């Protein structure tokens, strides 16, 4: 029983940590690009916003799928 809970927690953290690392990487790149090209701010932000939306949709779908598989009805 204890190992099942540990596996659940590990899988859930993987579903959370991977998108967090992706968002941190996008934020780092955003700040670097804004520092180099301050006049292109809107274009840079739109490019990052699209990638951020993709990461959020994928992570939400991954978590939703994870719970849907584990909940047997």
Image: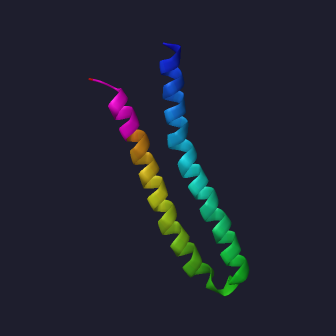
Q: Residue at x 42, y 54 (%)?
A: 57
Q: Residue at x 55, y 37 (%)?
A: 13
Residue 59 in the image, given as x and y percentages of width and height: 46, 49
Q: Residue at x 39, y 36 (%)?
A: 66
Seen in the picture, residue 62 relative to 32 is either above or below; the reply is above
Q: Residue at x 42, y 52 (%)?
A: 58
Describe residue 10's horizontal placement relative to residue 34 as left or right.
Answer: left
Seen in the picture, residue 29 relative to 20 is either above or below; the reply is below
Seen in the picture, residue 72 relative to 46 is either above or below; the reply is above
Residue 30 in the image, given as x and y percentages of width and height: 64, 70
Q: Is residue 3 magenta?
A: no
Q: Which portion, as a residue range, is magenta?
A: 65-72
Residue that sits furthest to the bottom in the current view:
39
Magenta stretch mostly in which secondary structure?
helix
Describe residue 1's horizontal placement relative to residue 37 as left or right.
Answer: left
Describe residue 23's horizontal placement relative to residue 63 as left or right.
Answer: right
């Amino acid at each position: 029983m204890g190992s099942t809970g540990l596996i659940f927690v590990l899988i859930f953290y993987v579903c959370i940590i991977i998108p967090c690392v992706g968002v941190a990487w996008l934020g780092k790149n955003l700040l670097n690009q804004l520092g180099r090209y301050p006049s292109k701010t809107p274009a840079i932000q739109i490019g990052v916003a699209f990638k951020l939306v993709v990461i959020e949709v994928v992570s939400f779908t991954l978590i939703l799928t994870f719970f849907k598989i584990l909940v047997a009805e």
